[in-house]
Amino acid sequence: MSATTATPAKRLDVDAIRAEFPILHQQVHGKPLVYLDNAATKQKPRSVIESQSHYYERDNANIHRGVHLLSCRATDAYEAARARVRKFLNAAEDAEILFTRGTTEGINRVARSYGELLSAGDEILISHMEHHSNIVPWQMLAKRKGTVLKVAPIDDAGQLDVAAFERLLSPKTKLVSIVHQSNSLGTINPIAELIAKAHAVGAVVLVDAAQSCSHLKVDVRALDADFVVLSSHKIYGPTGVGVLYGKRALLDRMPPDEGGGDMILSVTFEKTIYNKLPHKFEAGTPNIAGVIGLGAAIDWVESKGLDAIAAHEDDVLRYGTQKLTEIPGLRIIGTAAHKASVLSFTLGDIHPHDVGTVLDMEGVAIRTGHHCTQPVMDRFGVPATARASLAVYNTRADVDALCVALHKAIEVLG
Ligand code: 7TS
């Protein structure tokens, strides 16, 4: 759970926050919805939803190309969102903020593009708790370029073995790609320490901030991160859009991995000159409305305050951890000292999918499965877990509803 901060975070009015999320106020299967699948995607506040309809109702036009007013307004709104993200991540310049489809595309882009600069025998170091999107692109790169994938182990609590991580680093390590917060365990990695260790051997570091960005400050300059990826939909923004931050010195050296409109300065059949950053990496018409929605989502998150969001979620996580521990046969998977927002568990011999189905009938939405982290499941000797994951609008009452539904599952299936 998160470390205590020097100044106590302000207390949030969670009832008022819930009122900003239209989707939460409905019944499913005749029961009030209790949404606990936030690691998969967060719900959207009204300001985010309206930012997109406002754009489509008033400003919709293609960007960077038109001289007409709507195109200028659309371009301004799109570029204002880039500046918004730059400030949120504390990047040095807007040109270091590249829009993507999401975390998955961001990692694949680095693997394809930065990967072009690597040679056979170069090593990439990841951890055992990575999402498949931070495993498979490196396996694909290994096939393409002959790079070697190394994996740092985790312990029985789901924490990175930092000593083993350090032993796996060597001058051969060219890139470390590591998750800030695990989606299936909740573990928060000591990312600043890992970056410093990787830099000591000359490796660049990619941070997967998909889960962390909605409640932990990711300051790219304070961390000295080389690449950071995130998904808008996990920070209360729209789906289909994300961010790849990269240091200019790296992005300038990297070849574009997609060709098309907007990423060029000039094209002849003989020779094409690429555009400057960030456009070099943004071929084609982007998700303009999505980017604008992401800007609105960051405004919304910052209006509540990351510290206040983290403190509230932490309270519900502690309460939930205690309550779940009291349920007979329930085993929590992921008990790191430093974790956030995720309660993964198994319930006796009952298959997690069956647990999830009973919970759904009780109005409680959780996720069941391997959560795109099959190596984590293998590490803990389970095929799947049930996972309740928290956002700022969840309350202790949601945890109580989860527990009532779990007792029902034991009654029906146990
Ligand atoms: N990395 C982490 C740590 C994630 O949690 C996810 C998505 C991704 C990468 C991929 O993000 P995407 O937006 O490109 O899909 N995690 C989950 C999850 O836990 N349940 O559904 C998606």
Image (cartoon, rainbow, N blue to C red):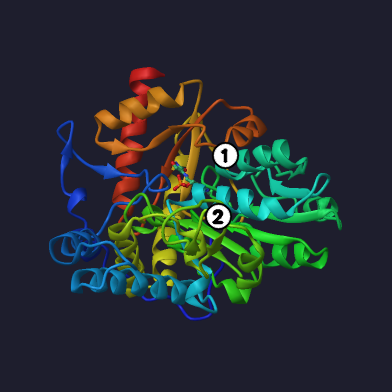
Does residue 159 appear in the picture of this structure? yes
Q: Residues within 10 Å of mark 2 (few under 14, many from 20)?
A: many
Residue at horizontal 46 percent and vertical 54 percent from the top: 318
Does residue 318 lie above or below 385 as drawn? below
Residue closer to the observer: 205 or 179: 205
Residue closer to the observer: 232 or 67: 67
Q: Position of residue 77 (x, y in %)?
A: 29, 71
- Quarter that holds the N terminus: bottom right
The kind of residue tagged 2 is Lys
The kind of residue tagged 1 is His
Indicate the quadrant where residue 145 lies.
top right
Residue at horizontal 35 percent and vertical 46 percent from the top: 399
Q: Position of residue 250 (x, y in %)?
A: 65, 66
Q: Position of residue 331 (x, y in %)?
A: 54, 34
Q: Earlier in the sequence, mark 1 or mark 2?
A: 1
Residue at horizontal 61 percent and vertical 42 percent from the top: 137
Residue at horizontal 39 percent and vertical 66 percent from the top: 309
Residue holding disc 1: 132
Residue closer to the observer: 260 or 186: 260
Q: Name the element at disc 1.
A: helix
Disc on res. 276: none
Q: Is residue 401 left or right of residue 84?
A: left
Q: CA distance from mark 1 to mark 2?
A: 20 Å
Q: Is residue 164 left or right of residue 377?
A: right
